[in-house]
Image: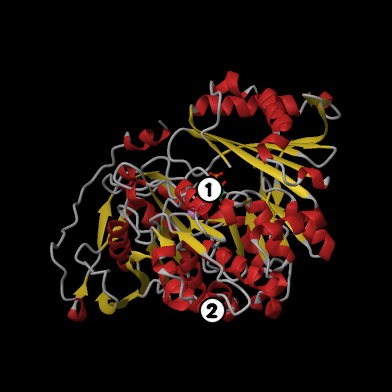
Amino acid sequence: MLAMLDSEVAPATTLKPRMHTSPINMSTTSVTSFTVDTGIYEGQKPGTSGLRKAVKIFQQEHYTENFVQAILQALGDQLSGCTLVVGGDGRFYGKEAVNKIIRIAAANGVRKLIIGQNGILSTPAVSTIIRKYKTQGGIVLTASHNPGGPDADFGIKFNCDNGGPAPDNITNKIYEITKTLESYKIIPDISVDIDKIQNISIKVDGKPFTIDIIDSVKDYLELMKEIFDFASIKKLLHGSADKPAFKVLIDSMNGVTGPYVKRIFSTELGVDDTSLVNITPLEDFGGLHPDPNLTYAKDLVNAIKQGPYDFGAAFDGDGDRNMILGKKAFFVTPSDSLAVLAANLKLIPYFQKTGIKGFARSMPTAAAIDRVAAKYGVQFFEVPTGWKYFGNLMDAKDLSLCGEESFGTGSDHIREKDGIWACLAWLNVIAGLGKSVEDILLDHWKIYGRNFFTRYDYENCNAVSADKMIQYIEISIQKPAFIGKKLQYEGKEYVVKRADNYSYTDPVDGSKTAKQGLRILFEDGSRIIFRLSGTGSSGATIRMYIDSYENDPATFVKDAQLVLKPLINIALEISELHQHIGRDAPTVIT
Ligand code: VG1
Ligand code: CO
């Protein structure tokens, strides 16, 4: 258990902060900051998307405080007098963390905090608010799709002033600070009712400090209304004289999107409340694993299979992921979703205004969007896994639309992937094309061919064995004789064209990121990819990605698992996965 290592380091305390039990009258208050000596916790290293650990790890004395102090110190010159946005996905420990951030930020010279009511802000909403109010950044309290509750996970992520997840140079800086931190600053006296929309100003060490508790939804809703054609979506959803109503079922999986879904789909678009499920954010997500895929969003899949619905969508805990389904639960892979949106982007008012600057996908994402980029002559980028790698391209105005196979889709309207945005984008496109989800896909494949894709996840593996397996594969695929090798399974043959450990040079700032996944590329464009997850909180998760292109229309309607079976088996053989980690089957297949 990797995570347990952290708790073995007991920090030294010399001063315990005083705590008031009831809120003090903030309007007249002037308070003074304290310095608290702390000890160092090992392993406060942000992964693919922030620091994610078990709640019990974050609850250790000074653990959360240390990390928050490190984030603030990493702001350097920007810290004094800055404004930060704070909010999270509503999971257990979130409110406690917000209060700690208020006390620590105030003591560190932050001038203003903008906080979502109840501590609730979806990840895309944080990005929206940072950009709209031009703040110096934000702190997102989420472990995204990881389960929540006292025995599950928590997470803290820092977003920069462009609204995007901190890039590697910043997260490395934060980590370096955690390794030498001797103390943090705090004002133990501050206690704020974050459930109430209000504006509070006090003096901290003689300087003004403001807390703005805001409506969690308002700014995000306004942005969505600027981007999409709400009138045509509304017409689609309610039908007209010649068209029946288009029935949707939206599942927030008890995550943060609940209040957003209610306001956008019910209040604005008039969708019946019975078509919006799990829309109350719960601290433990009601025991759900809030990850929108065919395994964890089974209830939605079954309801759509059996019900009268034309469309289904689900979102993850913090609202940045999405899954799109058509009638009878016709599944749109995230890679296809991205390609279809790319091909139809001009139907969305926002892109009519901004134009289409470029497309991008993460390396393991199937190459379907590459074909759309080629057809339209739009510039295209491939980046490592993690949304932070799209940010520079967007800031440089080189990128309009991007996505990841892990149910992440988004655009340059903000600097995070955006679940509700993807759902609205699909509805806007469907309204424009006047076709079913399935027909849109079938027509798309007729033009571009189909990239079959699957991802096998082996969760909670022994970390040492997983590392050994990755090393083993790397050595095997880098032998010169591997190139040109013919790999066969049940009569299908694939010829190795190239194999490497993926590395990326950011075209905007030239920064290099190495060892981002082992790739085996075949002559026909098919790919096998292995990488280790950077978002788990214990043990190791191995991800195996398979991408294969077919242009024979007879294969388009076939089951992906069937079409990909030869490559899947070749991948299992090359990696000797069973021998290394003793698993016969993956935990999750997407
Ligand atoms: C996973 C996904 C990656 C995504 C990341 C954060 O990372 O593969 O594509 O960007 O989660 O998503 P990893 O390192 O576990 O493969 V979220 O919605 O959890 O913020
Ligand atoms: Co997420």
The percent position of residue 213, horizontal first and vertical second, equals 32, 74
Percent x, y for residue 205?
26, 73
Q: How is the image coloured?
A: secondary structure
Q: Which residue is mark 2?
A: 225
Q: Nearer the viewer, residue 568 or 96?
A: 568
Q: Is residue 415 visible?
A: no
**Could you say which is closer to the camera, residue 160 or residue 367?**
367
Can you see residue 36?
yes
**Residue 521 in which image quadrant:** top right
Structural crowding at the residue carrying mark 2, measured as other residues with C-alpha within 10 Å and reported as few (<14), some (14–19) or many (≥20): some
Q: Is mark 2 within 8 Å of ligand 2?
A: no
Question: What's the residue type where badge 2 is placed?
Answer: Lys
User: Residue drawn at (60%, 63%), measured in percent from left and top?
Assistant: 410
Residue 290: percent from the left, percent from the top? 43, 50
Q: Is residue 400 left or right of residue 68?
A: right
Q: Which residue is mark 1?
A: 293
Label 2 residue SS: helix
Q: Which mark is residue 320?
A: none
Name the residue rendered at 43%, 68% in the picture.
260
The x, y position of residue 307, in whole percent, is 50, 55
Residue at disc 1, secondary structure: loop
Q: Is residue 20 left or right of residue 448?
A: left
Q: Which quadrant would residue 230 be assigned to in this image? A: bottom right
Between 87 and 225, the one nearer to me in the picture: 225
Give the residue type that dot 1 points to: Asn
Residue drawn at (83%, 45%) of the image: 552
